Amino acid sequence: MQNKEHFNWIDILKGLGIILVIMGHQRLSPELLNYIYLFHMPLFFFISGYLMNISKYNSIGHLIKKKSKTLLIPYITFSIISIICYSVIGQVDLDASATLQSFIEGKRNEIFYNVPLWFLIGLFVIEIMYYVLKKVIKNNGLLLVVIIIINFISVVILKVIEAPTWIWSIDTAMYYLLYYQLGNLYRIYPIKLADLKKVSKVVAGLFVFICISLNLILLLSPDLIYFVYQYVNTERVFLFIWLIICAIAGITTFVCLSKFIQKSERLEYIGKNSLIIFTLHYPIGIWGLDMLKVQLQIDIIHSNILSIIELSIILLVLLPIVKIINTKFPILLGKGRILESTRNVEK
C-alpha cells in the first residue's frame, strides 16, 4: 500500500509539472511566464532525483547502459519525429548540416526542431555526474556542499542562466544537479510528520509555510520578480541565492499540493506518460496550433485564458498518441523485445 501511495503522489506531481512545462511554452502573460520559469525545470530534476535508486547500478557502465536506453534512445527517436514534424507542419526546408549539429550538440535552447529535448541529454549527463560524485563522496552532507559549489560556479562564473554554451548541456547539468540531489535526498530521508518530535514538526511546518507563502507572493506580486531581476543583473551572487530560494519554494509548494490531492486518475495518467507528452507537445501541439492560427488568420496574442484552452487541446490531441506509442511502438521509449537483454541485466 505504501508503494502505491508513493507512486500516486509522484505521478500527480509529474502531471502538474508537465502542465507547467506546456504552459511555459505558450503565450502566457509575462508575469505568469516569469513565475513558472522560476521553478518548473528544477521541479522536474527534483522528481528525477527522487526516482533515482543508485543501489540498482553496480558500475558506471551499468548506469550508462541503462540510461542510454531510457534517455538517449528517446532523444534519438523523438528527434527524428520532431524533424519530420518541423518539416511537414512547419513547412520548412531544413539545412541538413545545421540540423545534425543541433542534434549532436544537444545544447539547452538550441535544439531548434524541438527545444525541450535538451532535458533528456541534460538528465543523462546529470545522472552520470551524480553517480560518480556519490561513489567518490560518501557523506551526503559533504556531497550537498560540493554540489552547491558546482551550482555557484554554473550561475556566477559560467553564467549558464543567460547563455548555456557547452555541448550536451553539461554546463546546464551543473546548475540542475543541485535539485536532482535534493530529490534524491528526499527519497533517502522522507519527511514524515507523524514520526517527528514536536519541535521538529514545528520547524518542518514553518519551512513549508514559508515556502508556500513565498510561492504565493511570487505568483500574485510579479513586480517583485521584476525588481529582483533588475538588481541581480549586477549582483550575480544574489542571483545564485535567489534562484535556489525560488526553486525550493516552488518545489515544496507543488510537492505539498500533489500530496494534498492524493488521487487524481487524470493527473496520474498524464504524469505516468509525461515523457511522451514532454517530447511531443512542442512539435505536434504548439506548432500545430500556431499553424492553424495562421491558416485561420487568427492573431497570436498573449492570453492566459487562451493558453489554458490551448493546453486542453494539446492534451486531448496527445493522449491518443500516448496510447498508440505505449501499445504499438514502445521501442520509441527504449522498451520492447529488441532491448530484452538489457532489461534482464537491470533486474
Image (tube, grey):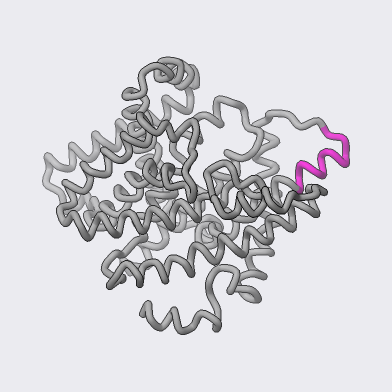
The front one of 56 and 101 is 101
The front one of 300 and 59 is 59
**Residue 328 location (% of width, % of height):** 65, 76
Identify the image quadrant of residue 290: top right
Q: Is residue 289 visible?
A: yes
Residue occupying the point 35% across, 41% down: 252
**Residue 241 location (% of width, % of height):** 31, 28
| Residue 36 included in the magenta stretch of the image | no
Residue occupying the point 62% across, 27% down: 29
Instruction: Decide: is 319 above or below 58.
Output: above
Q: Is residue 213 visible?
A: no
**Residue 47 location (% of width, % of height):** 40, 53
| Residue 289 included in the magenta stretch of the image | yes
Identify the image quadrant of residue 263: bottom left
The front one of 323 and 116 is 116
Magenta span: helix, strand or loop, mainly?
helix
Query: Along the horizontal axis of the image, is 301 left or right of 242?
Result: right
Q: Residue furthest right?
A: 296
> What is the magenta range?
288-298
Q: Quick one: quadrant of the N terminus?
A: bottom left
Query: Along the horizontal axis of the image, is 221 left or right of 306?
Result: left
Instruction: Decide: is 249 above or below 111.
Output: above
Instruction: Decide: is 236 above or below 96.
Output: above
